Image (cartoon, rainbow, N blue to C red):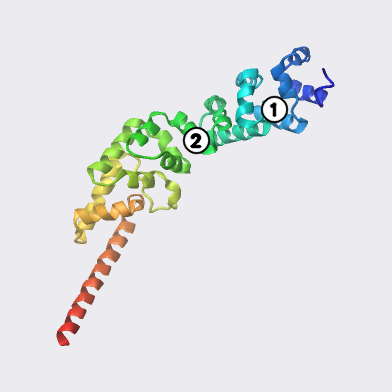
Amino acid sequence: MSKEIPNIYKKRQILLEANITSAESFEHLLKNPGWRNLLMLPLQEFELMMHSLKYFAPEIRSEVLAKLTNLEFQEKLRRARGKPVPARDIIDAIAMVKRYAEHFKLEPAYAQKIAADCMWDFLFMCNRDAKISVIGKLLGNKVAFLREIGFREDDILAIASTKRGAEWLKQLDLRELKEIYLVLKRNKLEPKLVLPILLKADLFPTSKTEKRPRNSKELEAQIFYRIHLGKRYGLSTKDIIRILTKRPELLVYGPRAFEHLIARHKKSEGLKVREKIRRGIRRIKI
């Protein structure tokens, strides 16, 4: 049996050092067809995969290995990936779920549990669908709500892929997310256009002028203040809402940025009026 498995003694040593098995138990592993498939991996792939599995606590790692050495599960992997134990794909899957755990700043124990649950998505789904599935598991009802109000899966993925977007979606509870949506609707600001901009902070530089609304009450106050400011320059509420819909980032930047934009807008309008007057005078002279 030992001759059939390449580098068996080296692989045995790797398993012993990782506390995955004992010297006595290793002999029993050799009689397990699922384990034999795993031990048939090239040494480098076997070593790298075992190193990746060190990310998990011993009890979680045991569960993952139990699945990977199950013959029925190996057959599913063979149909999906062409091999009963696709080591490189497994290594990549663990790396992806680790990245998401870090991205969403999950607590280590919870991160390992989620990673063990979600790594299979990257083995049986295309990369995009796996990412959406992982985000759905992490954010639960919030993702369902975003879909309900018209967000496509790619929209949700784009928001959650940014640093601040992930932070916001993790921190906001469902009730507060709904309140933000209602504030936008109440003020006739299109949520599908405005909400992603509010959530995706990677679009904006961090500066002293940035005053990001942290909840629905602050958001409503920011909208009200900009309407009040715009009216001082002679704009109607409708004009201001149109500007904020086209430039939602003005709800994030400090009011001075909004004031500068309105001033430019009014100056531009004034130039257009003066040009029309000049043209009218020229026509009269002719």
Q: Quadrant of the C terminus?
A: bottom left
Residue at 21% from the left image edge and 72% from the top image edge: 273
Left or right relative to 99: residue 8: right
In the image, what residue occupies the spot 26% across and 48% down? 223
Disc ID at residue 129: 2
Q: Nearer the viewer, residue 247 or 6?
A: 6
In the image, farthest residue toward the right: 3
Image quarter of the N terminus: top right
Name the residue type under label 1: Met
> What residue did someone put label 1 on?
50
Look at the picture and state if 136 lies above or below 220. Answer: above
Left or right of residue 57, residue 278 in this image: left
Question: Which of these two is toward me, 238 or 256?
Answer: 238
Residue 234, compared with residue 210, is above or below; it is below
Q: Amino acid at mark 2?
A: Asp
Which dot marks residue 76?
A: none
Q: Position of residue 163 (x, y in %)?
A: 48, 42
User: For residue 93, what is the image quadrant?
Assistant: top right
CA separation in Å, label 2 and label 1: 26 Å
Residue 57 shows in this picture: no
Q: Nearer the viewer, mark 2 or mark 1?
A: 2
Front-most of residues 263 and 113? 113
Q: Position of residue 51 (x, y in %)?
A: 69, 30
**Element carrying mark 1:** helix
Point 75% across, 20% down: residue: 16
